[in-house]
Amino acid sequence: TQLLEQSPQFLSIQEGENLTVYCNSSSVFSSLQWYRQEPGEGPVLLVTVVTGGEVKKLKRLTFQFGDARKDSSLHITAAQPGDTGLYLCAGLNYGGSQGNLIFGKGTKLSVKP
Amino acid sequence: NAGVTQTPKFQVLKTGQSMTLQCAQDMNHEYMSWYRQDPGMGLRLIHYSVGAGITDQGEVPNGYNVSRSTTEDFPLRLLSAAPSQTSVYFCASSPPGQGGYTFGSGTRLTVV
């Protein structure tokens, strides 16, 4: 069973600070997806990265897919209380079924005003 | 568009009872999946389907059955509920390609 390791598990910061969340594996993925989940709700897709070395920006969020397609990072600039939530990375195994999307355990982010 | 609709939102079962968690999507997505989410364990894949009539097991399939008779519906059946199946269950769907999944709002199940 392939694993996606996310770090850190918990992160508590002040408004305005920057942060980076990491998603690592020993497996190669055809794509990696990042989701954000709020309490009582299902995860919501933020971005999908497909090409090794790819960088995508979504306002203050920057996503990067490693050159070897085994890892990814999420960087948030000038965090705001509205960024609070559980951030999940998920990967599709290279050569495997698109239905077999595997999730990391998540990073719980708290941004204090 | 309603997206992915899960029912019920909450359910309490007694050990040994059976039930079906319903999931429907109105986006004509080919791929559908069931996950369970437990504290500290993240989202774990139970079963998934790549199209009507096709299902496959995920990481934690034991104690659960699925079928996919239509594109829209993907019910999850608990055959004989156990306390270990207490969890929050999420259904999700996706079109072909790398577009990512749309999740329902979940079913919180407690087995006593």
Image (cartoon, coloured by chain):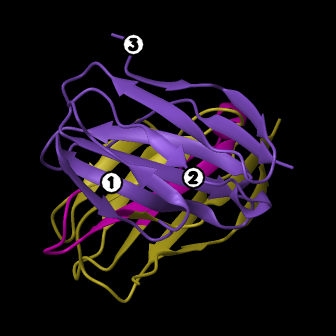
Chain colours: A yellow, B purple
Eye-nearest disc, 1 or 3? 1
Q: Is residue A77 found inside the magenta-colored segment of the image? A: yes
Q: Is residue A97 found inside the magenta-colored segment of the image? A: yes
SS for callout 3:
loop
Figure quadrant of residue B74 = top left
SS for callout 2:
loop
Figure quadrant of residue B100 = top left
Disc 2: which residue: B79
Q: Position of residue A43 (x, y in %)?
A: 52, 41
What crowding class fits label 1: few (fewer than 14 Cα within 10 Å), some (14-19), or many (20 or more)? many
Q: Position of residue A85 (x, y in %)?
A: 67, 43
Q: Give the residue displayed 46% in from the left and 80% down from the top.
A: A3
Whether residue A15 appears in this view of the structure is no
Q: Give the residue displayed 56% in from the left and 30% down from the top.
A: B105
* Position of A83 relative to A53 (above/below): above
Query: Pointers 1 and 2 in contact (CB under 8 A)?
Result: no
CA separation in Å, label 3 and label 2: 29 Å
Q: Position of residue B63 (x, y in %)?
A: 56, 62
For the magenta stretch, what is the residue range?
A: A73-101
Foreground pick, A35 / B76: B76
The furthest residue to the right: B112
Q: Horizontal placement of A55 versus A16: left or right?
A: left
Eye-nearest disc, 3 or 2? 2
Q: Chain of mark 2?
A: B
Q: Give the residue displayed 66% in from the left and 67% down from the top.
A: B41
Q: Chain of mark 3?
A: B
Which is more N-terminal, label 2 or label 1? 1
Which kind of residue does numbered mark 1 sit on?
Tyr
Foreground pick, B58 / A108: B58
Foreground pick, A17 / B4: B4
